[in-house]
Image (cartoon, grey):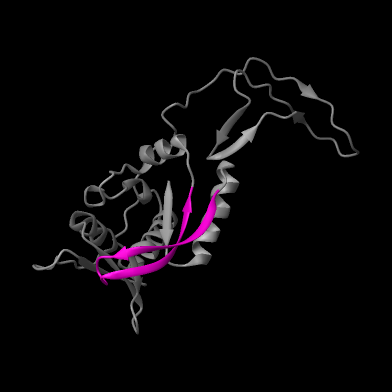
Amino acid sequence: MSLVVNEEYFAARYATALTACTGLPARLEAVTRPSGYLKRDLPGFRVRVVSSYLSDALRHYAGGDAHHLRQAFPRVVLRDIDTFDGFLDGYIEGDGCRAKGQGGRHVVSANVPFLEELAQIIGARFTPPKRGLRSQLYVTDGWAGRGTFAPEEHPLDPPESSWIKVQEVRPRPALGTKPFTFYGYRLAPYPTFLVNGHLVREPW
Protein backbone atom coordinates (compact mmCIF):
# COMPACT_ATOMS: atom_id res chain seq x y z
CA MET A 1 0.00 0.00 0.00
CA SER A 2 1.53 3.28 -1.09
CA LEU A 3 0.82 6.97 -0.39
CA VAL A 4 2.46 9.59 -2.62
CA VAL A 5 2.03 13.28 -1.78
CA ASN A 6 3.72 16.62 -2.41
CA GLU A 7 4.65 17.71 1.12
CA GLU A 8 7.22 15.90 3.23
CA TYR A 9 5.50 17.04 6.44
CA PHE A 10 2.22 15.40 5.42
CA ALA A 11 3.96 12.15 4.47
CA ALA A 12 5.96 12.09 7.72
CA ARG A 13 2.82 12.48 9.84
CA TYR A 14 1.10 9.71 7.88
CA ALA A 15 4.08 7.37 8.32
CA THR A 16 4.16 8.02 12.07
CA ALA A 17 0.42 7.40 12.44
CA LEU A 18 0.54 4.26 10.30
CA THR A 19 3.32 2.72 12.37
CA ALA A 20 1.61 3.65 15.64
CA CYS A 21 -1.70 2.10 14.56
CA THR A 22 -0.47 -1.06 12.83
CA GLY A 23 3.08 -1.69 14.04
CA LEU A 24 4.22 -1.92 10.43
CA PRO A 25 7.53 -0.24 9.52
CA ALA A 26 6.50 2.71 7.34
CA ARG A 27 9.44 4.26 5.51
CA LEU A 28 9.42 7.77 4.07
CA GLU A 29 11.31 8.28 0.81
CA ALA A 30 11.69 11.02 -1.79
CA VAL A 31 10.38 10.10 -5.25
CA THR A 32 9.43 11.66 -8.58
CA ARG A 33 6.36 10.84 -10.62
CA PRO A 34 5.15 11.99 -14.04
CA SER A 35 2.43 14.62 -14.26
CA GLY A 36 0.18 14.20 -17.28
CA TYR A 37 -1.24 17.65 -16.65
CA LEU A 38 2.10 19.51 -16.51
CA LYS A 39 3.89 17.13 -18.92
CA ARG A 40 6.91 16.78 -16.63
CA ASP A 41 8.14 14.88 -13.59
CA LEU A 42 7.25 16.26 -10.17
CA PRO A 43 9.04 15.70 -6.85
CA GLY A 44 7.14 14.10 -4.02
CA PHE A 45 7.31 11.81 -1.02
CA ARG A 46 6.15 8.22 -0.70
CA VAL A 47 5.20 6.08 2.27
CA ARG A 48 4.94 2.39 1.39
CA VAL A 49 4.12 -0.64 3.51
CA VAL A 50 3.66 -4.28 2.50
CA SER A 51 0.66 -5.92 4.15
CA SER A 52 -1.95 -8.01 2.37
CA TYR A 53 -4.19 -7.79 5.45
CA LEU A 54 -4.07 -3.98 5.53
CA SER A 55 -4.67 -3.81 1.77
CA ASP A 56 -7.70 -6.08 2.04
CA ALA A 57 -9.05 -4.03 4.95
CA LEU A 58 -8.68 -0.77 3.02
CA ARG A 59 -10.35 -2.32 -0.02
CA HIS A 60 -13.20 -3.50 2.21
CA TYR A 61 -13.78 -0.04 3.64
CA ALA A 62 -13.12 2.18 0.63
CA GLY A 63 -13.54 -0.12 -2.36
CA GLY A 64 -11.15 0.60 -5.16
CA ASP A 65 -9.90 -0.62 -8.48
CA ALA A 66 -6.40 -1.18 -9.81
CA HIS A 67 -7.15 1.25 -12.67
CA HIS A 68 -7.35 4.87 -11.51
CA LEU A 69 -10.03 5.77 -14.06
CA ARG A 70 -12.37 3.11 -12.65
CA GLN A 71 -11.99 4.12 -9.02
CA ALA A 72 -15.34 5.08 -7.53
CA PHE A 73 -15.86 7.64 -4.81
CA PRO A 74 -15.33 5.97 -1.38
CA ARG A 75 -18.69 6.63 0.29
CA VAL A 76 -17.30 5.48 3.64
CA VAL A 77 -15.59 8.87 4.06
CA LEU A 78 -19.03 10.48 4.34
CA ARG A 79 -19.58 9.08 7.86
CA ASP A 80 -19.01 12.57 9.32
CA ILE A 81 -17.61 15.93 8.35
CA ASP A 82 -14.24 15.37 10.08
CA THR A 83 -13.62 12.12 8.19
CA PHE A 84 -14.52 13.76 4.90
CA ASP A 85 -12.30 16.79 5.60
CA GLY A 86 -9.37 14.45 6.24
CA PHE A 87 -10.06 12.57 3.02
CA LEU A 88 -10.36 15.82 1.06
CA ASP A 89 -7.06 17.16 2.43
CA GLY A 90 -5.24 13.95 1.57
CA TYR A 91 -6.76 13.62 -1.89
CA ILE A 92 -6.00 17.22 -2.89
CA GLU A 93 -2.48 16.89 -1.48
CA GLY A 94 -1.92 14.08 -3.97
CA ASP A 95 -3.94 15.23 -6.99
CA GLY A 96 -4.42 18.95 -6.53
CA CYS A 97 -2.88 22.25 -5.56
CA ARG A 98 -3.63 25.52 -3.84
CA ALA A 99 -5.32 28.13 -6.07
CA LYS A 100 -3.05 31.16 -6.21
CA GLY A 101 -4.70 34.33 -4.99
CA GLN A 102 -7.95 32.54 -4.20
CA GLY A 103 -9.53 31.01 -1.13
CA GLY A 104 -9.62 27.47 -2.40
CA ARG A 105 -7.90 24.55 -4.08
CA HIS A 106 -7.94 22.83 -7.47
CA VAL A 107 -8.41 19.11 -8.02
CA VAL A 108 -7.17 17.74 -11.33
CA SER A 109 -8.19 14.29 -12.53
CA ALA A 110 -9.18 12.31 -15.63
CA ASN A 111 -11.77 10.38 -13.59
CA VAL A 112 -14.87 12.40 -14.51
CA PRO A 113 -17.44 10.31 -12.55
CA PHE A 114 -15.31 10.71 -9.42
CA LEU A 115 -15.17 14.50 -9.79
CA GLU A 116 -18.90 14.68 -10.57
CA GLU A 117 -19.75 12.91 -7.33
CA LEU A 118 -17.30 15.03 -5.36
CA ALA A 119 -18.80 18.21 -6.82
CA GLN A 120 -22.27 17.22 -5.63
CA ILE A 121 -21.00 16.63 -2.10
CA ILE A 122 -19.31 20.03 -1.79
CA GLY A 123 -22.02 21.88 -3.73
CA ALA A 124 -19.73 22.98 -6.57
CA ARG A 125 -20.32 23.40 -10.27
CA PHE A 126 -18.43 20.99 -12.48
CA THR A 127 -18.39 20.77 -16.25
CA PRO A 128 -15.94 18.34 -17.90
CA PRO A 129 -13.95 19.91 -20.73
CA LYS A 130 -14.88 18.91 -24.25
CA ARG A 131 -11.24 18.55 -25.18
CA GLY A 132 -8.36 16.98 -23.33
CA LEU A 133 -8.15 14.14 -20.85
CA ARG A 134 -7.89 16.14 -17.62
CA SER A 135 -10.77 17.77 -15.76
CA GLN A 136 -10.51 20.35 -13.01
CA LEU A 137 -12.72 20.99 -9.97
CA TYR A 138 -12.43 24.06 -7.76
CA VAL A 139 -12.94 23.45 -4.03
CA THR A 140 -13.54 26.68 -2.12
CA ASP A 141 -12.36 26.86 1.49
CA GLY A 142 -15.87 27.77 2.60
CA TRP A 143 -17.65 24.87 0.88
CA ALA A 144 -18.97 23.47 4.19
CA GLY A 145 -21.09 26.61 4.67
CA ARG A 146 -23.22 25.63 1.69
CA GLY A 147 -24.86 22.89 3.72
CA THR A 148 -24.60 20.26 0.99
CA PHE A 149 -22.74 17.68 3.06
CA ALA A 150 -25.01 14.83 4.17
CA PRO A 151 -23.46 12.21 6.50
CA GLU A 152 -24.05 8.55 5.70
CA GLU A 153 -24.00 5.51 7.95
CA HIS A 154 -21.36 2.98 6.94
CA PRO A 155 -20.41 -0.05 9.08
CA LEU A 156 -16.72 -0.25 9.95
CA ASP A 157 -16.58 -3.73 11.43
CA PRO A 158 -14.05 -5.95 9.63
CA PRO A 159 -15.63 -8.85 7.70
CA GLU A 160 -13.86 -11.37 9.95
CA SER A 161 -15.11 -9.75 13.17
CA SER A 162 -17.54 -11.53 15.47
CA TRP A 163 -19.05 -11.30 18.93
CA ILE A 164 -17.65 -13.52 21.65
CA LYS A 165 -19.08 -14.86 24.88
CA VAL A 166 -17.42 -13.88 28.16
CA GLN A 167 -16.73 -17.11 29.99
CA GLU A 168 -15.64 -15.69 33.34
CA VAL A 169 -14.78 -12.37 35.01
CA ARG A 170 -12.74 -12.46 38.24
CA PRO A 171 -11.77 -9.29 40.15
CA ARG A 172 -8.12 -8.91 41.11
CA PRO A 173 -6.79 -6.97 44.11
CA ALA A 174 -5.15 -3.66 43.20
CA LEU A 175 -2.03 -2.28 44.85
CA GLY A 176 -1.96 1.23 46.27
CA THR A 177 -3.89 3.41 48.68
CA LYS A 178 -6.78 4.34 46.38
CA PRO A 179 -9.31 1.55 45.91
CA PHE A 180 -10.21 0.70 42.34
CA THR A 181 -11.23 -2.37 40.37
CA PHE A 182 -8.89 -4.03 37.89
CA TYR A 183 -9.90 -6.84 35.55
CA GLY A 184 -7.55 -9.10 33.61
CA TYR A 185 -8.77 -10.82 30.44
CA ARG A 186 -7.45 -14.10 29.11
CA LEU A 187 -7.94 -14.24 25.33
CA ALA A 188 -8.02 -17.48 23.36
CA PRO A 189 -7.07 -18.58 20.82
CA TYR A 190 -5.66 -15.17 19.76
CA PRO A 191 -3.98 -12.85 22.31
CA THR A 192 -4.64 -9.62 20.36
CA PHE A 193 -7.73 -7.84 19.08
CA LEU A 194 -8.89 -4.47 17.76
CA VAL A 195 -10.91 -1.83 19.63
CA ASN A 196 -12.08 0.94 17.27
CA GLY A 197 -9.05 0.32 15.06
CA HIS A 198 -6.50 0.24 17.93
CA LEU A 199 -4.45 -2.90 18.53
CA VAL A 200 -4.97 -4.24 22.06
CA ARG A 201 -2.88 -7.01 23.57
CA GLU A 202 -3.65 -9.43 26.35
CA PRO A 203 -1.98 -8.30 29.63
CA TRP A 204 1.06 -10.26 30.68
Residue 76 appears at what percent x and percent y? 36, 46
Q: For this view, does 4 lie left or right of residue 38? A: right
Q: Main secondary structure of the magenta part?
A: strand
Between 80 and 13, the one nearer to me in the picture = 13
- Which residue is situated farthest in the right direction here? 177
**Quadrant the C terminus occupies:** top right
**Residue 150, x across and y down, in percent:** 31, 54
Image vertical order of residue 87 relative to residue 181, above or below: below
Which residue is more in the foreground, 49 or 115?
49
Q: Is residue 143 left or right of residue 162?
A: left
Q: Quadrant of residue 200?
A: top right
x and y, in percent, of residue 112 in the image: 18, 58
| Residue under the point 37% across and 69% down | 42
Total number of numbered labels?
A: 0
User: Is 89 left, or right, of 34 in this rendering?
Assistant: right
At a point 35% along the width and 44% down the height, the residue shown is 62
Residue at the far bottom in the pictured view = 101
Q: Which residues are magenta?
A: 26-48
Q: Quadrant of residue 168?
A: top right
- At horizontal 78% and vertical 31% (from top left) the residue drawn is 181
Q: Is residue 169 above or below residue 31?
A: above
Q: Is residue 31 magenta?
A: yes
Outermost residue toward the top? 167
Q: Nearer the viewer, residue 50 or 22?
A: 50
Q: Position of residue 190 (x, y in %)?
A: 60, 22
Q: Pick out the residue farthest to the left.
A: 130
